[in-house]
Image (tube, grey):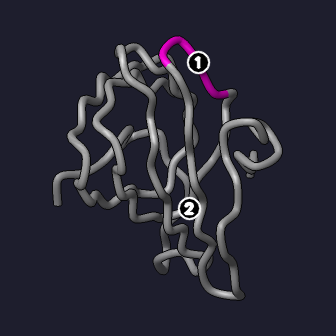
Amino acid sequence: MNDPIVTDPDLYRVLWENERVRVLEYRDTPGEATHLHSHPDSVMITLSAFRRVIAAAGREVSVDLEAGQVRWLDAQHHRGRNVGSTPTHSLFIELKEPRPGAGHTDAALGPSTA
């Protein structure tokens, strides 16, 4: 796993952690991008509205979210770029216990609406 705290320590920081979950804060400004990194199954909470492009395995997905949204993220490897005109500010609640039979995938890029 490419830990985002290691790949992009200027953009991610750990707010809290125990043996079952880790809470990350993410902040960037327009034009900033992350390196390829991984997230386990997670819940994302948007604290600001933002527009990003998420890329993995030769695919790109545009993501445009309003502040205050909560989204499920399947485990995935990706990189992201702020393509909007506003800073990104979000929280990730990462689950350390994966779903039985599930691994990282590039099939479900970006947040789910479920």
Q: Amino acid at mark 1?
A: Glu
Give the percent coordinates (x, y) of residue 65.
Answer: 24, 37
Q: Residues within 10 Å of mark 1 (few under 14, many from 20)?
A: some
Foreground disc of the pair 2, 1: 1
Task: Check disc 2 and report the residue beneath it.
Answer: 40
Q: Is residue 57 above or below residue 83?
A: below
Q: Mark on residue 32? A: 1
* Magenta span: 30-34
Q: Earlier in the sequence, mark 2 or mark 1?
A: 1
Disc 2 crowd, CA 10 A, few/some/many (<14, 14-19, 20+): many
The quadrant of the image that shows the C terminus is bottom left
Residue at 40 percent across and 21 percent down: it is: 53
Specify whether residue 54 is painted magenta. Answer: no
Residue found 71% across the figure and 88% down from its top? 19
Picture coordinates of residue 5, whole percent (x, y)? 76, 49
Instruction: Report whether 111 appears left or right of 80.
Output: left
